[in-house]
Amino acid sequence: MAEPGHEPPSHSRRFTLRRGKAGRERPAAYGSGLHLRPTSSACGLRARPTPAGRAYACGLHLGPGPKRPRTGPEELRVSPPPRSRPASPGSLRGADAPPSGPSRSVARGGGLRLGRAVVAAVMERFLEGRRAALQEHIQHHREVHVVMGNEACDLDSTVSALALAYFLAKTSVPPKAAVIPLLNIPRADFALRTETTFLLREHNIPDSSLIFRDEIDLVGLHKAGLLSLTLVDHHVLPSVDSALEEAVVDVLDHRPLEREWAPSCQLTVELVGSCATLVTERIAQGPPGVLDRTTAALLHGTILLDSVNLSPAAGKVTPRDVLCVSLLESRFPELPPHDSIYKALQAAKFDVSGLTTEQMLRKDLKTVSGDEQVLAISGIYMDIELFLRRPGLLQDLETFCQARGYSVLVAMTVSFNECYEPKRQLAVYSQNEALRSMVCRALEEATTPTLQLQALPSPWPCISAYMQGNTLASRKKVLPILRAALGGGPGTAAGPEEEVAPPPTPMNSLVEESPLAQAVPPVCPQAVLERVSRMAAEQHPPDSDK
């Protein structure tokens, strides 16, 4: 919340300039709003709140906005969570679970050492109280502010929603609205997000404390005039949620900007490796003491997974991701080593053992539509050639697409070698040969970015398979190509990303022409931090009275 008498900025799209002594303008660190000063901490950096009137970059107002016709509270329902089920034998909550209390444990396979119940108490208490708070506000016809991730509900979306909701609930004065983090999938699909269930379990956060999309009536809340929305890890609502757009008051996303929002909506769209980086920056700009260890550990692990362990070779990390990881580690030196947490999360994410083909396709699914055609694009966590030889694959693909009305299915795979260099493959399935050929042609001929596709042998005539030479072109870059191919709106046909996106962050690997998009020597994170520290040390500290 912005302090009274100070208007928050309406957008966070460019590097901000702050005035130091003698009226000299100073750039904020990487446009994040963080002031950096050398300290004796391990990383040599300390985050300080911005000057008065800018203590909160979000400027979020949790008021209901314009009055809308209200329906009776009896029409709104909150579904109760199912009873907790016993953990599977392979989980840390099974027979080999460690004793409760402040002991430390080692996760199987990853060597991940995380603190237990004592450190999780603050976040866990907050989450366990959300369902009751939601029901109470509905019954008394009071506002509900929902923080919602995207429909893929990956680790980044989940942690960003949980962490930002926790921060807003702690810093909203007065706390008029019930702040509810919402996982944008049905509860039944949560078990497919294996890396998310793993990390939350490690921090003693039970599934029963979470609220899922099929347990809350957002449309009913909106019609009753009770709903305000913050979107994290996406900024374009699917067509089925278009009625909720006028309830959106705040957006945090790390994708190229695809649509404009009203000036009243606080918009933070920055090309960084993880939305959790933007949430960390938002929290760091708030009052001291809000960030607890569990929230820091969730953000820390998420940034490491999204940035492929801060590896420049993977083409995802930016200096702001490195800075936020260092900031979290300086506040909580007991956080696990990078390699331990990354390997454990990566192993959990790629663990598809026991999943059916239908579950694998639903695990990481997005859709685009246009001209009465709906295309699905699924992230598959296994080699494409092994995937194509799964027993009963064609029948499974046909059943999956027919049940959901998909005309085309694109499967994208990604894996990483020991040097964190990605390998990407994709396959296009459709029983409609003309439609499949059109989609394949769009992918083959794409120029912004070029995918550098090489055909792979396919055992099925209705499936075209490719090796993707441009390993930096992730799914978020392929989606606009597919959207444009279906005539569903501007995609890459509208021009390069730089023409429709915010100004790029320096060395931002998500921009095609950035240095990290070409062959460059590895960037040492410590060298980046030392350079930032030297730059900060040369700046004059802000006046304490201003």
Image (cartoon, rainbow, N blue to C red):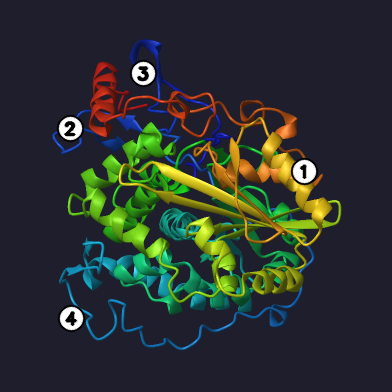
- For mark 4, give the secondary structure: loop
**Which disc number belongs to residue 20?**
3
Cα distance in 3D space between marks 1 and 3: 50 Å
Residue 429: x %, y % from top left: 69, 58
Question: Which residue is painted at 25% across and 69% down in the image?
Answer: 108
Quadrant, the C terminus: top left
Q: Kindly check if marks 4 and 2 are in contact, taking CB atoms under 8 A apart as contact.
A: no
Q: Earlier in the sequence, mark 1 or mark 3?
A: 3
Q: Kindly check if marks 1 and 3 are in contact, taking CB atoms under 8 A apart as contact.
A: no
Question: Which of labels 3 and 2 is toward the front?
Answer: 2
Q: Which residue is mark 1?
A: 485
- For mark 2, give the secondary structure: loop
| Amino acid type at mark 2 | Thr
Question: Which residue is painted at 33% across and 15% down in the image?
Answer: 21
| Amino acid type at mark 3 | Gly
Few, some or many C-alpha atoms within 10 Å of disc 4 (few <14, some 14-19, many ≥20)? few
Q: Kindly check if marks 1 and 4 are in contact, taking CB atoms under 8 A apart as contact.
A: no
Q: Which residue is mark 2?
A: 39
Q: Earlier in the sequence, mark 4 or mark 2?
A: 2
**Above or below: residue 26 compared with residue 106:** above
Q: Earlier in the sequence, mark 2 or mark 1?
A: 2
Question: Which residue is painted at 20% across and 79% down in the image?
Answer: 100
Q: Which residue is mark 4?
A: 99
